[in-house]
Every structure is written in C-alpha cells, then in structure tokens.
Amino acid sequence: MTSPVDPVLVVGTTSDYVERIAGKLPDRSIFLSDIDIYKETGPPAVQRETQIFASLRDPEESFSRLKKFIDERGIRPGGVACFDCESLLLASDMARRLSLPFPSKQAVMNSRDKLVSKRLWQDAGIGCPRAAMARDEEELRAFIGDVSNPVVLKPATLSGSELTFVCDTPDEAVKAFHVIRDGLHRRMLDRTLNRDRMVDEHAVLCEEFIDGDEYSCDFIVDETGTKIIRTARKYMMGGGPAGTTQAYEVPGMPREMVETIDLAGLLSRASKALGMERCQGMADFIMRGGEPYFLEITPRPGGDCLPQVIEQSCGMDMLEAHIDFSAGRTPRIPPESEWKRTVGLRIHARRGGRLAAIRLWADRVRQEILETGWYREPGDRIGLPPEDYKTWVMGYVIFRPLPGVDVQGQIKDMMAAVEVRIE
C-alpha cells in the first residue's frame, strides 16, 4: 500500500484526460506525455509541474526523462496507470523499471494482438470467434471457405472499430482486405498511432461473424477475486462503418443475467489466460445463445464517452477509480441501487468538409439531457472513414431514457434533435 502523497504515473494519455485528472487530483498524478503530438505547437505550459514530455516511441528516452523529473523533485511514484491501448507496452516497461505493479509485457502483447488473445481463450475453453491471420488473398479465401457465416476483417492490434468490415461475399472481403492494408500502411508510419510498433501493414485479422447483441464491461481482477464495475449495452450504427458503436446504455445487463452467465468467473479466466493476474480492465463481448463470445480484453478502463455515462449513471469517476486502483487502493463500486439507466449517444459526421454548426435542440425531445460534449467546433475540417476515424466523431449527448420506451427509437429521436451542418 502506498502513501497518499505518492503520485501515480499516467503514461501517454490525451490532453483532455491530463487536464481532467490534474484538475481533480493535482497531487496524486504525474504524466508521461508524447512530445510527438506537440511537434508543431510545442508542449503546453499549464501542466509543466506535473508533465514529462518525451518521444514515447523510445522507452530509453522516456525513462531517462522520467527519472530526471522524479529525482529532481524527490518524487516516488506510487503506481502506474494507462488509458490508451497504444501506450500499454510503455506503461508496462516503466512499471517494471520502477518496480511497480502492472500487467507484464507479455500479458499486454497477448491482449493487444487479437489473434493471440483468441487462441489463448480457445485453449482455456473461453467462448470467442474463430479467427485466423491473412497476409494475402489466398489465406483470406481459405478462411472464408472454412466458415459458413459472414466474415469480419479488421486490424490485429488497433483499438475500437477502426478499419473493421463485415463481408458477405469473397469479393467484398478481398476489396476490404486491400482497404485495410492501405490503412495499416498509413498508420504504421504514424508515430502516435503506432507508438508501440505493433502495427503490421501486411496482417489482416479474419474472424467469423457472431450475430448477437454486443456489450462491454469494466472490471477489476486482483487477489480478492473479480469485481464487475459496470456493464454497457452497445447500440450499433446502421449504415455506417462496421462495428461502430452509436450509443451505450448503462447498466447494460440486469444483475440476474450477469450472474446467470457467470460473467465475473469468465472474466477472471479470460484475463488470466492472457497473463493478467491483477488489472483494471475492459472487455467487449457478444451474446449468442445465452453465452458471451469475447472479442477483446485490455488492461485499461473503457473509453469513448463511457466515463461520462458512468458518472451520470452512478456518480463514479472512472478516471479517479483507475488512479486509485493503480495506487493499490480498491475503488468503491456503487451498489446496484445507485445506478440509473443512462444512455450516451455518440455523434458522427455524415459527410466531410468544414464544420459550420453543431448544436442540440433539447426542446425537440422529451428525455432529460444530462450532459453534452463537443469534440469539434465551427471551422474544423471533418473527414470520414476509412481515411479519417478521428474528426468524424463530433461529440456525445448523454440522456436519461424514458421508461417503457424502446431505447433504439429514443436514440433515433435524439439523433434527429442534433444539428450538424457541414459545408
């Protein structure tokens, strides 16, 4: 157990997370941040006393600058936290050098590589899609011949739905294969997206398509067992890039369902199969035939707008909880009675160009609006997938759904009340 004054080292997160954590926990966190993000503008001065800047692609430079920073200030980090998949390997390395707990390098690599994850889960008897790696059209067609369902093609290491395609025919799959390869080539050259150098421009992951409702959850695995923090049901975007989440509903599963499928037990086995003995993690899975099929487990909290949705649902700050857990403390998980049904709607652009206006017309809906957040502002240039998966996400709207009314319909109504004007 560490002292309350021992700050947690947060490795490689985004500026909005830095500002939020530093603002709320100013004496409990220091940040190892990527100087490559600030090549043109220079690092911001506002966090000078808590931020260390380095090229996070270089572990030696990163540790050298971190060591100089903490030695000059007489700081003894009390834990290591990470919120970004591409920074997990570096976080593991920094934790090892500082003799602090964090999932091992091998465990992180197992979680980052979706094919390795599924092979380990299959060996452990954990439900997951059949999968194979394709490096050319011949290997792709061979996998298609082995599965009767549609196939899902995606990168092996990128997070989220980036460059993900559901293909019904071999010709569709071949076309998607080359789109993914082209996208991976660009990302392999990106110093931030390929921070951990795990992007392989030639490798495309092929998975069988699992038809069912998709969920995610945050959880804790430690020496006392497995604790589920929250579940979320995903509502997928229709007519957009495959695998794109349009909205999250929290809580996503009733407690009876969580217990019936023994989600905690499965998460424990699935995490330990990857080599994670202690972690605060996030899992994505699909329910089919009353059983979960795991897509991904990673040793970090869920992203997108989920931290905001969770806080609006029960008051729990997931960023602070992760800092607590990384410092060796056990975060308080609110009991079921404190969670209120909450929906977080992600707003995506439907066309590219220059953003002229974005606003929510709250008087057009009956639901209680809890929070809005806009990532873009008028004048910004907006791109679309598969070239641009960043600027097309415009923001989010969090609302309290009406009881007894179909949530999917409420999502549609809320989308209609958001004006996004792009010229």
Image: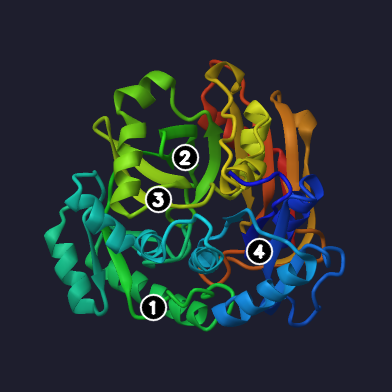
Mark 2 vs mark 3: in front: 2
User: Which SS class for mark 1?
Assistant: loop
Quarter of the view holding residue 411: top right
Q: Which residue is mark 3?
A: 297
Q: Where's the C terminus, which quadrant?
A: bottom right
User: Which SS class for mark 2?
Assistant: strand
The span from disc 2 to disc 3 (Cα, nearest Å) is 12 Å
Q: Which residue is mark 1?
A: 200
Which label's residue is closer to the chain start, 3 or 4? 3
The span from disc 1 to disc 3 (Cα, nearest Å) is 20 Å
Identify the residue shown where x is 70% and y is 62%.
Answer: 31
Q: Which residue is mark 4?
A: 391
Mark 4 vs mark 1: in front: 1
Q: Which residue is mark 2?
A: 220
Which label's residue is closer to the chain start, 1 or 3? 1
Q: Position of residue 111 (x, y in %)?
A: 38, 58
Identify the residue shown where x is 46% and y is 78%.
Answer: 197
Which label's residue is closer to the chain start, 4 or 2? 2
